[in-house]
Amino acid sequence: MGWRDHTAPSRQGRRHGTGPSARRRMTVVVGLLGLASIGLVARAFDLQVVRKQFYQSQGDARFLREMKIPVSRGTIFDRNGEPLAVSTPVMSIWANPSEVLDNADRIPALAKALNDDPDTIKQYLEQRADREFVYLRRQMAPEAAQSVLDLDIPGINGQREFKRYYPSGEVTAHVLGFTNIDDHGQEGLELAYDDWLSGKPGIKRVIRDGKGHIVEDLEQVRAPQPGRDLTLSIDRRIQFLAYSELKSTLEKSQADSGSMVILDAKTGEVLAMVNLPTYNPNAVGSTSASNRRNRAMTDVLEPGSTIKPVLMAAALSSGKFTPTGPAIDTTGGHWYFQGHDIHDTHNYGLLTPTGVITKSSNVGAAHIAMQLDTGLMYDTYRAFGFGNSTNSGFPGEASGYLKIGRDWRPLEKAILGYGYGLNVTVLQLANAYATIADGGVMHSPTFIKGNDSDAKAIIEPQIAQQLVNMLETTTQPGGTAAPYAWIANYTVAGKTGTAHKAVAGGYSKDNYGAAFAGMVPATNPRLVAAVVVDNPRKGSYYGGLVSAPVFATVMAGALRLLDIPPDNIGRWYVGGPLQVQNGLTGNQPPVAPNIEEAPAEEATP
C-alpha cells in the first residue's frame, strides 16, 4: 500500500469533523442575535410601555415648563377719569447660572449690554450655580432688554413684567402710596386695594430648547385675570391746587410740615388730601420714611380752638345755651382756675356764646365747658368722631385720643373746651366740620367715588345750622379769620386754631400748630376743608394768618372748578363786598399779616 492509501482516510475524517463544528458556531451566532433582538424588544417595551411615564416626565422636566402669564395692574383714576396710577410694560433679564458659566467667554458681552462689570456678574452666577433661575436685571425698558436677548447667549432669557407709574408724582403720593418691584401695593390706596388692583397671573405650558428659548406654546393652564380699575373720589385739579398753595405757605413760613384735607360735605368723599414734605413715588428708594408718612391720617395734634364748635354743639344740645345767651364774663382776659391761668390775648368783657366763637375766647370756652354735664360733653366729642377711627379704610389711620369722660378732672374738662388734652387727625377735624355742614349728619370719609354708604345723624339739624351761623361770624369783620378766609362772592364759615405744641414736661412757648377748618358756601355748604401748618417759624404763627389764606385760595379755585354758584352777590355787610364802577368785585382782598394786629387766639393751656 502506497502513501496515498495511508493519507486519504485522514482527509475524509477531517471533512466529516468540520460539519458539526460550523453548525454549532452558526447556532451560537443565531442564538446570540436572537437574544439581542429579544433584549432590544424588551428594552423598547420597557421604555415605551412599562416606564414610558417616567421617562416622559424626565424629558418634560428638562424641556417642558409652566410659565406665568403676567397681567397688568388695574389703573387708578381720579373722579373725572384722569389716570393717577398706570402700569407700563417692562422686561426683566434672568439667567440659568450653570448654562451661562458653560459659556463664560460670552459674559463680557453680557456685562457690556447690562452696563455692569464682567467679574461681578461671573461671581454672582458662581455663587448661585446650584439654581436654575436668577434675576440679572429687573424692570428694564423693553428696547434695552431686547438688545441683551439679541446677543443669543445660552442661559439668558427675558420675562415680561409691568412697572407702576404715577403721572402726578409727589402731588398724589400720600394718597396713592406705591408698589414694590413685584408690583404689589406697599402703602396708601395701592396697599388698601391691592387684591382688587392686582388681578391673577395666568399660567401656560411651553417647551424650551437647550438654550432656554421658548420653541412652542403647548396650552394655557389658567387664563390671566387682569387687575380691576379703581376710580377715586380725588379731583386731581383740586389736589394740585391744595399742593401748590400749601407748598408756597410752608416755604414762606419756614414751617416743618403741613396738611390739607378737602371733603364733599354731602357725601364725605375726599376730594383732596395733601401733605408736605412729600416724595416721588416713581423713585421711592431715595426717599425717607418720614416724608412718605400721610400726616393727615397718621399724625395727631391738639386741635386748639378748632374744637370750639364741637363744644358749642354740646352747649346748644344741653338747653342751657343759645347762640345769643346767656352772656359769659371774660373780663380781664384771665381766669385762674385750680392754680392754672386760662387766658385770652385780649380783654373781651361779656361775650355771647357766638362771641366766644367769633373772638376765639379760651376763657369763655372754659366757662361753658364747666357748666356742661361731663357725660354730655364727652358723648358729643365722641359722636363727632374724636377718639375713634373714621373708618376710611386707609392703612395706618390713627384714631386719636380722647380720655374717658368719667376720668376727667375739673381742669382737664376746662381745657378740653378749647382744644387741649385730646389728639385728633386732620381728617377727623375735617370730618367733624363736614358733619356740621351737612345738617348734623356724619359720613364716613371715603376715597372711592360714589361710596356714600355710612351716614348717621348725631346732632339736630337746627343746632347744626346755628353752628354754621356762629362760625360765619369768625370770617366777618372782627372775627379771627377776617379778612384772610374771605372768598370773593361767597360766604365762608370756619374756625381758626393756634395751639402750643406739647413737649416733654409741658408745652413749648415757641412751637405752634396753626389751623383753620371751614366750609363754603356757608348758606348751603358743599365743600369742607381743614388746613394745619406745623411750627411756622417766619412771620406769624396764628391760624387766622397762616392757614386761613391757604383755605381761601384753594377753596376759591375749587368752587370755580366745580362750578358752584356764588351765594354772596346780593349780601352786604360792613367791610364786605365792594361796589365799584364795573360792578361787584367781591370781598376786600387779604393784606399781608401784621403780627402787631394779630387776631385773638388761644394761648397756653
Image (cartoon, grey):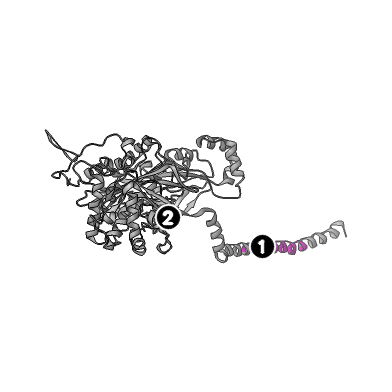
Image point (56%, 38%), residue name: 107
Q: Quadrant of residue 376?
A: bottom left
Q: CA distance from mark 2 to mark 1?
A: 122 Å
Image point (30%, 37%), residue name: 597
- In the foreground, 540 or 169: 540
User: Residue 544 appears at what percent x and percent y?
Assistant: 31, 42
Please say whether residue 23 is one of the residues in the magenta stretch. Answer: yes
User: Residue 255 appears at what percent x and percent y?
Assistant: 40, 39
Work out whether 389 lies above or below 251: below
Quadrant where the image shows the N terminus: bottom right
Q: Main secondary structure of the magenta part?
A: helix
- The span picked out in magenta is 16-37
Please say whether residue 370 is one of the residues in the magenta stretch. Answer: no
User: Residue 562 appears at what percent x and percent y?
Assistant: 22, 46
- Residue 354 is at least partly visible in this image: yes
Question: Which residue bears the numbered disc 2?
Answer: 338
Q: Secondary structure at mark 2?
A: loop
Q: Quadrant of residue 598?
A: top left
What is the three-letter code of the residue carrying label 2? Gln
Instruction: Say few, some or many: other residues with alpha carbon within 10 Å of mark 1 (under 14 / 14 to 19 / 20 or more).
Output: few
- In the foreground, 343 or 432: 343
Question: Which residue bears the numbered disc 1?
Answer: 30
